[in-house]
Image (spheres, grey):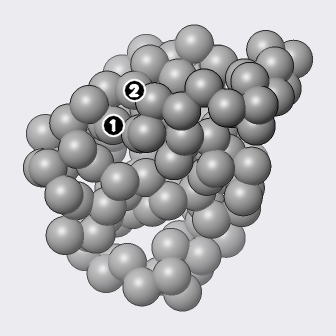
């Protein structure tokens, strides 16, 4: 099954761009979980629901890598959790992060992987 996740942090932001990208990729609108205004709260109901729904072999599609978490550590932790559960992750707007995720799945410690890890530390 293919799922999508979209998140905005403030009331001034709009989900439309993310939702359109997910739907254009082929995610059924009913399989998209969303969170709004998460900048000041630790609880993200849409993400929590999605984590319970995802099963081995499912695909999670996100427009941008930073939609998964509010900081590098939170994002990396979630990515590793999903990979360990056998969930494929598709990042629509970042071939670099997509390559990083694929390398994590393979546990590949190549030059490219080391380069991407160094880039993550800068973020």
* 118 left or right, relative to 110: right
Packing grade of label 1 (10 A; few <14, some 14-19, many >=20) is some
Quarter of the picture holding the N terminus: bottom left
Say whether marks 1 and 2 touch (CB < 8 Å): yes
Packing grade of label 2 (10 A; few <14, some 14-19, many >=20) is some
In the picture of the structure, the residue carrying the numbered disc 1 is 83
In the picture of the structure, the residue carrying the numbered disc 2 is 80
Instruction: Give the image quarter of residue 42.
Output: top left
* 102 left or right, relative to 122: left
55 up-or-down from 66: above or below? below
Looking at the picture, how far across and down is residue 102, in whole percent? 51, 47
Give the number of the disc on residue 59: none
Instruction: Give the image quarter of residue 57.
Output: bottom left
**Numbered marks: total:** 2
Residue 53 versus residue 34: which sits nearer the camera? 53
Q: CA distance from mark 1 to mark 2?
A: 5 Å
Q: Residue at x 67, y 70 (%)?
A: 17
Quarter of the picture holding the C terminus: top right
Q: Residue at x 73, y 55 (%)?
A: 94
84 up-or-down from 32: above or below? above
Q: Is residue 116 visible?
A: no
Determine the secondary structure under disc 2: helix
Residue 22 versus residue 115: which sits nearer the camera? 115
Looking at the picture, how far across and down is residue 22, in whole percent? 50, 73
Looking at the picture, how far across and down is residue 89, in whole percent? 43, 52
Residue 21 versus residue 1: which sits nearer the camera? 1
Q: Residue at x 13, y 39 (%)?
A: 52
Determine the secondary structure under disc 1: helix
């Amino acid at each position: 099954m293919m799922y999508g996740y979209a998140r905005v942090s403030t009331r001034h932001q709009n989900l439309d761009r993310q939702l359109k990208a997910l739907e254009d990729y082929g995610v059924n609108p009913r399989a998209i979980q969303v969170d709004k205004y998460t900048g000041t709260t630790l609880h993200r109901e849409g993400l929590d629901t999605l984590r319970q729904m995802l099963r081995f072999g499912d695909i999670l599609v996100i427009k941008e890598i930073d939609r998964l978490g509010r900081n590098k550590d939170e994002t990396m932790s979630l990515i590793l959790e999903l990979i360990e559960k056998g969930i494929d992750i598709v990042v629509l707007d970042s071939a670099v992060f997509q390559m990083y995720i694929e390398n994590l799945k393979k546990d590949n410690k190549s030059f490219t992987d080391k380069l991407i890890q160094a880039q993550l530390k800068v973020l």
